[in-house]
Amino acid sequence: MTTNVRDLRKWKSEGTRFTMLTCYDYSTARWLDRAGIPVLLVGDSLGTTMLGYPDTLSVTMDDMIRHAGSVVRGAPGALVIGDMPFMAYHASAEDAIRNAGRFLQEARVAAVKMEGGGRVIDYTKQLTAMGIPVMGHLGLTPTFVNQFGGYRVQGRSDEAAEQILADARALEDAGAFAVVLEAIPSALGQRVTQVLSVPRTCVAAPSPPLSTSTPPAKAAVIESANAMQEQAVAWRHAGDDIGVVPTMGALHGGHDSLVARARRENQRVIVTVFVNPAQFGPNEDFARYPRPFDQDRARLEALGVDAIFHPPVDQIYPPAFKTRVDPGPLAEVLEGKSRPGHFAGVLTVVLKLINLTQPKRAYFGQKDFQQVVLVRQLVRDFGLPVRIVAVPTVRHPDGLAMSSRNAYLDDGQRQLAPAVHRAITEAARAFTAGETDPLRLEGVTRERLAATQGLSVDYVAVVDDTTLSRPRRAIPGSVLAVAVKLGSIRLIDNVVLGAERL
Ligand code: AMP
């Protein structure tokens, strides 16, 4: 299947990261396509990298069309974007339309890119109105090299940064499906990402060399419970809202989406990275659970978090620790039935983490749907002053929900795993088509799962989203939840009926 601009919008809304690479020729395109790179940009950096020019100004539409066409032929699965070169749209809107049209007709690219804010915003409107997808490009815009007096980082002053933000918004309003940012400070890049609902990507062309990277801001790593609470109280006294994202580390795109949401909604973001022994059963994977903290830390710094709370076990459970939360009957069904004591462990640590981090909002993934229900119950029952935000499940392109435990799957199991999502999607489709009998919806899922050898079902259940009991009839908002085992690896997933585009 070929990636299209709708996929990009969907990935942005789900918080899924994707890779865009520049490419100028058929054989590289073939390799990149086989490696699954979803977006290829044929940049006018062609001039400096392939044609030996000192800058990109000499590159013509004919050069671009010849190379873009070869990339399209080499990468049938990728969304290929053609970069409009110098003078392709600088003189008039007619030029912009004619040359974008040539790109689509002669090279068969799916979209074009134009550099700059200002006038290209009008051109963007005109091209998108004609059905030609446009990618914007802000920051260092190589066709402006003479005006900028060389290749220099852009957006350093407050005024220039505000202009880039305003241009980004204007490009989105004009219909651009994505915006490229080149050579701007990383903090400004994060601000642009926050204000846009369309994706943004960064480009790095191999030549000319640019020293543009601003290292991401350091996040404080806090290990002591008291120090964490003191810092959080200080932030709250200063009037800042805190968003907390509790995790067990081994971070992936699902976690990123929780953090990105927290970043948008709070002045301060704390991510807790703690593999909580209390929520693992005696025969579960506590000891071998992955703990790649250095990687997690770098990832969180790139996402611009303020603090990472990474306590050793005795900071959460000192020797004198005695009290435990009893989660009651909702912890005895579904996951709780298969994992006795799991939710007592989860709620105990969540209560403690909330007290230590003083959040206004706490972010949890819909993937662990029963966990969200029980954490909401905890907040209600104990009057905790925090809002629980549930964030949609982030998936791999083949539908498998991202999970730290996916790392345990071997190649064969990894191939089988997307069957879970296919099975629940099929039931969700049956619901949309009018089937409301919970048993029949479960039956559709079971049948689908039974067709996948090597996969055994733990439970398939249509449940009410607050009582967790099976409703007489499924209604929009009822949840179809599934747990399966692939060998010794347990996977869970769910779908909210009537809520997702299928
Ligand atoms: P974990 O580190 O597995 O305890 O997960 C930390 C948080 O991330 C929990 O609230 C999870 O529900 C959430 N999460 C895990 N996987 C995903 C995913 N694929 N999409 C969205 N949220 C997720």
Image: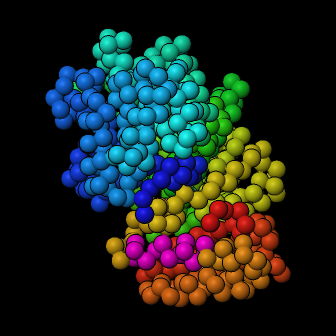
Q: Position of residue 400 (x, y in %)?
A: 49, 67
The residue shown at (41%, 45%) is 104
Secondary structure mostly seen in magenta is helix
The residue shown at (46%, 70%) is 285
Quarter of the rendering containing residue 424 = bottom right
Query: Image quadrant for the C terminus?
Result: bottom right
Above/below status of 13 relative to 467? above
Q: Nearer the viewer, residue 268 or 136?
A: 136
The magenta span reads 413-425
Query: Image quadrant for the N terminus?
Result: bottom left
Quarter of the rendering containing residue 459 = bottom right
Above/below status of 459 relative to 65? below
Tell whether 313 sits left or right of 268: left
Q: Can residue 15 be seen in this snapshot?
A: no
The residue shown at (69%, 60%) is 372
Q: Quadrant of ligand 1?
A: bottom right
Q: Position of residue 81 (x, y in %)?
A: 39, 43
Q: Position of residue 57 (x, y in %)?
A: 28, 22
Q: Position of residue 65 (x, y in %)?
A: 30, 40
Q: Nearer the viewer, residue 268 or 40?
A: 40
The residue shown at (71%, 62%) is 499
Q: Nearer the viewer, residue 126 or 325?
A: 126
Tell whether 408 sits left or right of 207: right
